[in-house]
Image (cartoon, rainbow, N blue to C red):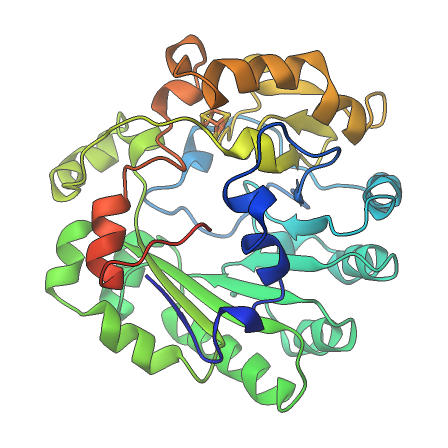
């Protein structure tokens, strides 16, 4: 369920989300992805119940500014492509996050930052406002403090709320950043609290609120999840992957991956490494095209350890989404 304060057109990425290339005509893919997802760091302060990061043994690290600049030089040669700071860590924990933002924005590239919101200090808030980040999306969990703390192990609900309210207040009448909250819930948490009340509480402070179903597929084999699996009632029906037509993923160490679902950087999920391989070479190369053939144009997911557990961008949540949105679908 997605709700906007001022309609979907207010979303800075509406030009992508509403384009035919994003919604329907994505095969064959364009010369460059719609989004380049960059992992600033894989460090995180939390240990969320559902997060695949708990399976990762990658050393902690962060992208260096030279690599980021070279990546953005290439992205800037493809106007319209946007960058998302995301990955298997908290982007705001990169100690030079303001410099990273500057590298993207001074090249005129639209930027969205995903954050758990806890490291958003007063100074960083000012920097994000001054640098005109296009979209700042807060990832939450649950629909109230109790549900948030249960899912976001190590989180601080009050601090998060304070930080969201502060950036909203400081932004005042300024347009950027567009502010959004995306929360996800376990199915029976919906019986304790209503998504409509959650949305009504936040819309106004932020411009967009999304409520979705928590994805436990990648971590369902982990012991600490087993008591909660019964709660997720959505059926698993695999569909063709669309991610491989829309976005490319780069990890902090320059690894280029087929998508963002792999927390471990498994060799089967790595295309190459930047800068030895350019983004264009990865996007238009044989490996990507082969993966598109296998999981984007067919249902060969079983051949790959990450795709095997992936019901991403398929109809897994459609029933749930319909229920939440009163029948509407959304393509994001
Ligand atoms: S099917 Fe594979 S390539 Fe596509 S999003 Fe899932 S894990 Fe990534």
| Residue 43 can be seen, yes or no | no
Residue 283 vertical placement versus 61 (above, below): above
Q: Please count the marks in the image.
A: 0
The quadrant of the image that shows the N terminus is: bottom left
| Residue 251 can be seen, yes or no | yes
Residue 254 vertical placement versus 44 (above, below): above
Q: Position of residue 88 (x, y in %)?
A: 54, 40
Residue 90 vertical placement versus 293 (above, below): below
Q: Position of residue 37 (x, y in %)?
A: 64, 43
Q: Residue at x 44, y 66 (%)?
A: 181
Q: Residue at x 40, y 41 (%)?
A: 51
User: In this rendering, would 73 be left or right of 1?
Assistant: right
Q: Position of residue 141 (x, y in %)?
A: 34, 58
Compare residues 293 and 121 and report the one nearer the observer: 293
User: In this rendering, would 66 be left or right of 118?
Assistant: right
Q: Residue at x 53, y 15 (%)?
A: 293
Compare residues 21 and 74 and report the one nearer the observer: 21
Q: Position of residue 211 (x, y in %)?
A: 33, 60
Q: Quadrant of residue 127?
A: bottom right
Residue 262 vertical placement versus 141 (above, below): above
Q: Residue at x 41, y 12 (%)?
A: 300
């Amino acid at each position: 369920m997605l709700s906007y304060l001022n309609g979907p057109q207010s979303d800075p990425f509406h030009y992508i989300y509403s384009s035919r290339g994003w919604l329907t005509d994505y095969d064959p893919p364009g010369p460059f992805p719609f989004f380049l997802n960059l992992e600033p760091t894989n460090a995180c302060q939390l240990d969320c119940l559902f997060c695949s990061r708990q399976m990762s043994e990658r050393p902690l690290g962060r992208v260096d500014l030279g690599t980021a600049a070279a990546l953005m030089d290439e992205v800037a040669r493809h106007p319209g492509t946007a960058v998302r700071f995301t990955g298997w860590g908290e982007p705001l924990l990169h100690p030079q996050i303001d410099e990273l933002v500057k590298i993207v924005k001074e090249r005129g590239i639209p930027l969205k930052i995903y954050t758990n919101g806890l490291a958003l200090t007063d100074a960083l808030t000012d920097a994000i406002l001054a640098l005109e980040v296009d979209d700042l999306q807060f990832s939450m969990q649950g629909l109230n403090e109790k549900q948030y703390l249960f899912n976001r192990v190590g989180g601080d609900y009050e601090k998060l709320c304070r930080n969201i309210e502060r950036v909203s207040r400081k932004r005042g009448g300024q347009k950027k950043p567009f502010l959004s909250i995306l929360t996800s819930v376990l199915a029976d948490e919906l019986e304790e609290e209503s998504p409509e009340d959650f949305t009504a509480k936040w819309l106004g402070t932020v411009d967009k609120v999304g409520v979705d179903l928590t994805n436990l597929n990648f971590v369902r084999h982990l012991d600490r999840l087993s008591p909660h699996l019964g709660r997720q009632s959505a059926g698993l029906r695999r569909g063709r992957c669309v991610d491989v037509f829309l976005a490319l993923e780069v990890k902090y160490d320059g690894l280029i991956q087929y998508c963002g679902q792999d927390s471990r950087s498994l060799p089967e999920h790595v295309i190459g490494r930047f800068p030895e391989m350019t983004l264009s070479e990865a996007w238009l190369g044989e490996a990507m095209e082969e993966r598109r053939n296998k999981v984007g144009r067919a249902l060969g997911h079983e051949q790959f350890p990450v795709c095997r557990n992936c019901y991403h961008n398929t109809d897994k949540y459609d029933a749930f989404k319909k229920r939440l949105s009163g029948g509407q679908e959304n393509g994001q």
